[in-house]
Amino acid sequence: MIAAAVTVLLWASAFVSIRSAVAHFEPGALALGRLLAGSVALVAVLLVRRGGFPPRAAWPGILISGVLWFGGYMVALNWGEREVDAGTASMVVNVGPILVALLGGWLLKEGFPPKLLSGMAVSFLGAVVVGVSMSGGDASSLTGVLLCLVAAVAYAAGVVSQKPALQHATALQVTTYGCLIGTVACLPFAGQLVSAVSEAPLSATLNVLYLGLFPTALAFSTWAYALSRTTAGRMGATTYAVPGLVVVMSWIVLGEVPDLLTLLGGALCLAGVAVARMRPRRAERRQAAEADSGSYVAAEGTPGATQPEAVAPEPGCVTSRGARGRD
């Protein structure tokens, strides 16, 4: 819970910092500068910790999350925040957790509870309301909302790819090598970054360093640490605290407050995830557990004998398998 709280707080601050930095850095250059700073910090920590290389089984998830989440997500988000305010960007991007739950249920076999599907519908309605409130017939605003939706899709795909990798590698390994892969993917923007650093004020460059060290290196590490100990859907739902924090931060730092219709859309997003995260009734949980336990052939060879219902460990419990090599 502490790791998740650190992640949410730092990611909320990132929306405000990005909104300020894009005035001096192109979207790709900002993403590359942020990833470079984060990679240097993460590699240093990995060397001190003697983290080594992830096993081969972890690399597919690391590669996909590195390209889509660390690379594609950051470029799309930076571009989107040039067109819409920080609070609106955070609300639209936070459609991502619903997509995480959907993909997690399909690809990671986390299931599709009816409340999840209902909540997903409500949150998508909220995203539509936010888009309508921001467009106002202005093509640039609509473009910004669409770019933030692209960022949400990249984020969801990255999380679902990262989850299996954490079964084979540590959170530090997955984060470090994912960040390095994202950096390589953004190298075509190196020329823009050099030009921007030479022309931007020192405060803007320090802003990029902050984004790399804290919302990237630290927050992505605490995210991976927490994700390795719970489901993708449940972890994704924690980020729905981000829009409220962003609205407060952007009001204090940038003087930006979304209008009432935008806030209504954000409230619908939050209401949707509240429905999606409602705990199932005891009878529903018992039926699901019975379905998962199944039947087995007893040692005497009698078919159909059933094993007593297994109890899954609570998130955060240390098991003999999960204790190995975890940070």
Image (spheres, rainbow, N blue to C red):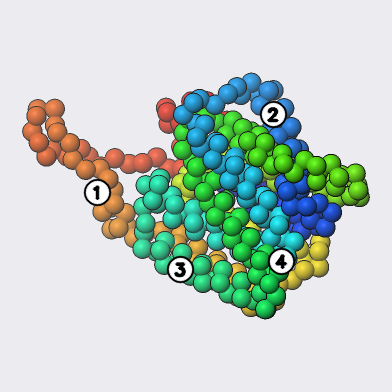
Q: CA distance from mark 1 to mark 3?
A: 27 Å
In the figure, residue 226 lies in which quadrant?
top right
Q: CA distance from mark 2 to mark 4?
A: 34 Å
Residue type highlighted by circle 4: Val
Residue ID for mark 2: 43
- For mark 2, give the secondary structure: helix
Residue type highlighted by circle 2: Val
- For mark 3, give the secondary structure: helix
Is 197 situated left or right of 289 in this image?
A: right
Measured as percent of width and height from the top left, residue 24 is found at: 84, 54
Residue type highlighted by circle 3: Ala
Is 63 situated left or right of 48 in this image?
A: left
**Nearer to us in this view, 289 or 247:** 247
Q: What quarter of the picture does the C terminus occupy?
A: top right
Residue type highlighted by circle 1: Ala
Residue ID for mark 1: 291
Residue ID for mark 4: 84
- For mark 4, give the secondary structure: loop
Q: Nearer the viewer, mark 4 or mark 1?
A: 4
Sequence-first disc among 4 and 1: 4
Is 91 situated left or right of 284 in this image?
A: right
* Location of residue 300 with respect to 291 vertically, above or below: above
Badge 1 crowding class, 10 Å Cα cut-off, few under 14, some 14 to 19, many 20 or more, is few
Residue ID for mark 3: 121
Sequence-first disc among 1 and 3: 3
Sequence-first disc among 2 and 4: 2
**In the image, what residue occupies the spot 67% across and 49% down?**
74
